[in-house]
Image (cartoon, rainbow, N blue to C red):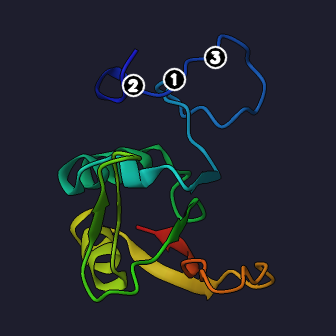
Amino acid sequence: MGLEDWRGGDDDDDDDDGDDDDGTTRYDLVWTQWCLGHLTDEQLRCFLERCREALVPGTGVIVVKENLSTSGVDVFDPVDSCVTRHEETWKSIFQQAGLRIVKEEPQRGLPETGKARLLPVMMYALQP
């Protein structure tokens, strides 16, 4: 199954598992890290919209943890087939997907690597 076919899960049990009355599964948290760079901007927007619709209304959160481009623009790596997005690109896509940033925080405690510097990592908590 590809992402384009995903519609969320269906559970047959009757416990309080996050299902709405219509059988749609809702999630308190959707966490992504270091994988969204493999999606185009349009695919990412659509993915985030689908995640937004799958959240528990009012309290559900989407967390995005990704490297940030430090060159002022998005950078595509043909070896890894992924894009490292600039902070403004992330924020624009979040807005297009109908999400607002409720908290953003840089990853701390990453090791120093000598001459080669690691890309900064940002964590965004998002809600509709």
Q: Earlier in the sequence, mark 1 or mark 3?
A: 3
Image quarter in which the N terminus is found: top left
Q: Earlier in the sequence, mark 1 or mark 2?
A: 2
Callout 2 secondary element:
loop
* Front one among 60 and 15: 60
* Drawn side of residue 53 relative to residue 21, left or right: left
CA gap between label 1 and label 3 equals 8 Å
Locate residue 119, reporting x and y percent: 54, 78
Q: Residue at x 63, y 86 (%)?
A: 115
* Drawn side of residue 124 relative to residue 90, left or right: right
> Label 1, on which residue?
23
Image quarter in which the C terminus is found: bottom left
Q: Mark 3, residues whose alpha carbon is within 10 Å: few (<14), some, or many (≥20)?
A: few
Q: Mark 2, residues whose alpha carbon is within 10 Å: few (<14), some, or many (≥20)?
A: few
The type of residue carrying mark 2 is Trp
> Label 2, on which residue?
6
Q: Which mark is residue 11?
A: 3
Locate residue 102, reporting x and y percent: 53, 82
Q: Earlier in the sequence, mark 3 or mark 2?
A: 2
Do residues under tags 1 and 3 come within 8 Å of each other at their CB atoms?
Answer: no
Locate residue 50, reporting x and y percent: 35, 44
Callout 3 secondary element:
loop
Considering every residue shown, the one lying at the far top of the view is 12
The type of residue carrying mark 3 is Asp
Q: Residue at x 46, y 80 (%)?
A: 101
